[in-house]
Image (cartoon, coloured by chain):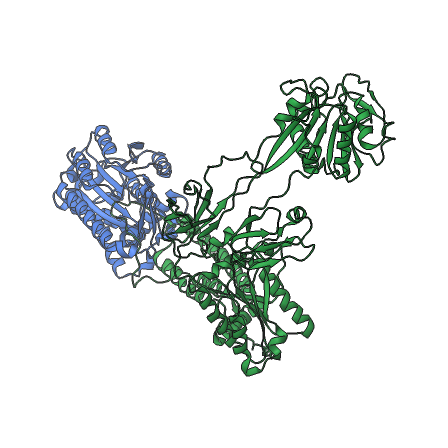
Chain colours: A green, B blue
Amino acid sequence: MSFLAPLFLLGGLAIALPVVFHLVRRSSREKLVFSSLMFLKPTPPRMTRRNRLEHIFLLLLRCLAICILALGFARPFLQKPMAATPTNTAGAQVVILVDTSASMKREGLWADAMDKAEAALKKATAADQVAILTFDDQVRSVVSFEQWVAMNLSERTVLAVQRLAESKPTWHSTHLGNALIAAAEVIEDAEKREQHTGPRRIVLITDMQEGSRLDGLQGHEWPRDLEVVVEPIKAKRPTNAGLQWVMDAEDSARAAADSPVRIRVNNSADAKREQFQIRLSGVTGGDSLDAYVPPGQSRIVPAPKLPTNAVAERITLSGDEDDFDNTAYVVQPKAEEINVLFLGSDAEGDSSQLLYYLKRAFQDTRRQAVRLVADEVTRRTPSPTNPPPHVGGYKLAIISSTLSEERGGEVRQYLTNGGTALLVMNDSLTAKTLGQLTGAPDVIATEATVANYAMFGQIDFTHPLFAPFSDPRFGDFTKIRFWKHRKLATDKLNGARVIASYDNNDPAILEVPFGRGRVFVFTFSWRPADSQLALSSKFVPLLYSLLDQAGGISAQLAQFRVGDTIDLSTLATKNGGSTLSVRKPDNSQVQLASGEARFTQTDQPGIYEVLAAVVPVKFAVNLDAAESKTAPMPVDELERLGLPMKSVEAAPALVAAKQETLHNAELEARQKLWRWLIVAALAVLLVETWLAGWITRRSAAPIEAAA
Amino acid sequence: MSALAATQTFAKQNASAPASKLISPQALMAIKNLELRARIVVEGFWHGIHRSPYHGFSVEFTEYRQYSPGDDPRYLDWRLYARSDRYYIKKFEDETNLRCYLLVDHSRSMDYGSLGWTKSQYANTLAATLAYFLHQQGDAVGLLTFDEEIRDYLPARNRIGHLRRLMLQLEQATAGTATDLGAPLKRIVEIVRKRSLMVLISDFLAPIETLEKNLTTLTASGHEVMLFQVLDPAELTFNFDRAVMFRDVESGRDLFIDPATARKEYLHRLNTHNEAVRATCQRLGAGCRSFSTDRALELAMFDFLRERHQRRKSGNRFARSRK
C-alpha cells in the first residue's frame, strides 16, 4: 500500500496521548464516601511506575481510532503500475512571435530578442515545424511552416535567423492580443491541412510593456492544448518618459494666437528619475522647461514659449534613458474661413428679426471662422462703387425675402453650380422666391391657421441635415413651438423631399434640388414672434448641420499616430481631382494613385506635407502614447485572459515525476480507501463510547452501594 | 462465679479454642433485631463459661449478710452456717445497684462501614449487649445518644420495659452532621448527680484537644469513665487501591486521594491520634478499649469486664460505692 500524503502518518504518534491519559487519570470522577478526612491531605494525580494501565481494551480502542484516522488522512491507495504512455513521435508545431513595435527600439532590446529567437530555433528538433512572425500593430510572416519544411534540415536555423535579421523594430504600436490570435490561427490552419498530432506552442518574444494592447483576447476562446511560452526581454535601463501633444477639441473656442501648445509628459512605472527638461527643437533662442513627473504618472505642461515670429514643429524631452519617444511633432491647424451670405432686409441689431440670431449663432472656433455677410436686398441701392456681394463666393446663401430678377438669377446660377441655399419663409410671399429659384413659378404658399401653436410632428432623422440629432437624447423637437408658419403646396416642386413636418402633417422643412445644388426651405421663421427655434438649443447645431451640408466644414488634418490611414479626399477635391503626393519626414515622396485619396504610409513619426494641393497642408504623425508605457506587465496578465502559460520547460525527470504523482493521485481518487477508514474509525469510536459509558456506570454502582 | 473468674475462664477457654466458636460479626449483624443480637452475644458469652446467665447478681463476693426470708437460698454460705449455726447470704459487689450510662455516638461519621454494616450498627449492638448484660445483672442502665447535640436520653433504670425502650432508642437512625462531645457530656454531668459508670461508645474522630477537655468534665465529676472506640477495618488499614475523590460523610467535603501515596501518612496520623486518645484516658483515669467492627462482640464483653476488674484492683473508689 502506498500513501498520497505520508506525512499524516506522523499523526499516529498521537496514540501517546490516550496512553498518558490512562496512566494519569485514575477515575478521578469516582467518589468514595469515607468517615472522616481529618487525617487525609489531597494528593495530585501522578504517574509512577507503580501505576498500572486500567481498561486496557478501552485504551486499545482509542489508540486504534487514532491510528485509523492517521491512515485515512495519509490517503492510502493500492499501487498499480502506470500504463506506458505512448511516445509522441510527432514533432511540435512552434510559432515564434517576435515583437517589432516602437518600444523595442530601446537600447539592447532588439539584440536580446534576436538571441532569444535564435535560441528557440536551436531547440527545434528535426520533426518540429517552426514559423516566425513579427508583429507591431500588424502581423507579418517572416518564415511560414511550408518555408521551414522546404528548407534544408541543416540550414533551417541559420536561414531563419537571417530572415529574421532583416526585420527591424518599427515605429508602430503593440497589438499583442491580435498578434497572439494571428499566431494561433497560423497553427490551427497548419494543423487542419496536415492533421498534425504533436504538441503546439507559441514562443512569444517581447518586452511585455504595459502599453501592449490585449483587448483582442477579451472573450476570445483560446485553442486547447496550445501553450504560450513567454520569453520576456528586459530593458537594461528602466527609466523612460514620453511626451504627446495635447490637441484642443475641434469645436472649442479658438485659442489666442500666442497661447502655448500643451504637452503631456508620462513617466514609466519602473522609472528611477523624475525630473525632465522640455525644449523646442529647431528654434534658436527658445527656452527649456523643467517638468517633474513621478514614476507611473503623467503631467500636462505648457510647451516653452516661442520667440516672436518663430514657428516650431518639434518638441523634445530629455532626462530619461531612452529617447525613442522623446519627440513630439506639432502642426497647429489653421481655422478655415467660411463665408455665409444673408439676403434679407433685416437690421443687424433688431432682435425681432432673423439676422440678429444668425450673427450670434455662427461663432469662431479652432476649426472654422464663419463670416456672415448681410446684403439688404430691398433697402440697399446697388451702385458701381458698392456692388452687391456675388453669391458664388459663399458657401451658403440664406434668403429671407423676395429677390429681384437679377439677384434671383444669380442665386439660381449659384444653385446650378452646386451651391446651397436656405429659404426662410417669413411670409407667404416668399413662395414666389422659391418658385423663382427652383423654376416652379406656380408654387403657392398660404398662411397656416394655427390653433394655439404647432410643433414638429415627424422628422426624417436619416437625412444628413438631422443626422446629428438622430440620437434619442438630442432628437426631441417637441419643445419648440411655432405660432406662425406657411402652408406650402409641394406638388409643384420637382424632387422636393419633406425632411420635417408639423403635427398637422404640413411640411416644415423641405429639400428641393436644383441643378447641382439644392434649396432648403423652412416654412417658418425663427423670429421670436413666429417660433421658439432661435431660442432653443437646437438652433445652432441645426445651422451648423446646414453649413456642413453646404460643404462649408471640411475635415482638418492635424495630428495622427503612426500607422493611421489618412483621408485626403477633401484635399483631393480642392485639388480639382488631380493626384496628390505626400512628402514624408525622411524627405521621400509618395505619389497617390489617381482617384486614391487615402494615405497609409504613416510609418514614421514626423511632419508630413501634402504636396500639389491648392494650399500645401502639413500634418503631424506621432508615436502612439501607449508605446511610452514601457514598464513590464506581469505574465499573469496573459494567463488571466485564458492563455495556458508555460514559462519554463520542465526537465524530463521532473516531467516523469510529475506524471507519476498525477497517476498516484488518480489511483487514490478512484479507490477512495480513506472513506472506508473514516467509517472504521467511526465504528471504533462508537464502541469506545459505549464501553467507556458502561465502565463509568459500573464504577459508580459499587460506590453508591458502599455509601 | 465471680465476673473475674468468669472472664478468666472465658479467656482460657477461648484462647485455645478456634475463632469459629465465637459468633462472627457478619452473622450477628445479619440479625435485624437489636435485642436479639444482644441476647445472643450475652448468652454466647455465658455459654462459654458454662454458667447460667441468669445469675442475678454480678461479680465479686464482698461480705456476708444475715439471711432474710425471701432471699435466694442458693446464696446461703453453708460453711459459715456450719461454723456459726446461722444463716448468712453472700453479698456480692453489685448487690448494691450499679448505675451505668451508655453514651452512644450517633453522628454521621459512625454511619460508615466497609464490611456490610456500619460502625453505628456495631456500636449499637455493643451498647445493647452491655445494656442487656447489666440489666440481667440487676444493674440500672441508662442511655444517651448524641451527635452535635443530645438526641435521646433515658435515665438509668432496671424496671420492666426499660430495656425495651432502651433498645428502641438505640435503633434510631443517625442523622447528625458532626460530632460534638462537649454538649452531651456537659448535659450528663448536670443530670446524673450520683456517681455512675459512663461508657462512651464512639469513633472519637475529633480533635484531641476537644476530646480531652470534654473527658475532663466527665471524670472531674467523679464518674467512672470507659471509652470504647469503634473503628472500621478500612479506617484502620486504609487498604484502598484506586485514586478517587474521597467524600467526608459528615461534612460532604471532597478530596482527591491517591491511597498509594496517602496511606502511610494517614496511618501515622491515625495511630498518633489513637495514642493520644489512650494517653488522655490514662491521664484522666478513664478506661479505653479500641474495637474493630470485624471483631467478635463476645470479646468486647470480655474486654469490658476485664477493664472493670482492673480498675477495681487498682483501687478505684467506685468499687466500694454504696447506695
Number of marks present in the image shown = 0
Q: Residue furthest front?
A: A384
Is residue A77 among what the camera can see?
A: no
Question: A52 above or below A363?
Answer: below
Give percent across and percent down for residue B320. 15, 38
Q: Quadrant of residue A133?
A: bottom right
Front residue of this view, candidates B302 and B153: B153
Q: Is residue A622 visible?
A: yes
Residue A279 position, x and y percent, is 40, 47
The x, y position of residue A481, in whole percent, is: 72, 22
Left or right: B49 in relation to A324 = left
Q: Position of residue B130 (x, y in %)?
A: 29, 43
Report the front residue among A666 and B90.
A666
Residue B262 vs residue B6, the one in the foreground: B262
Is residue B256 shown above or below A88?
above
Q: Give the residue displayed 66% in from the left and 38% down from the top.
A: A552
Q: Is residue A82 shown above or below B180? A: below
Question: Residue at image x 81%, y 29%?
Answer: A436
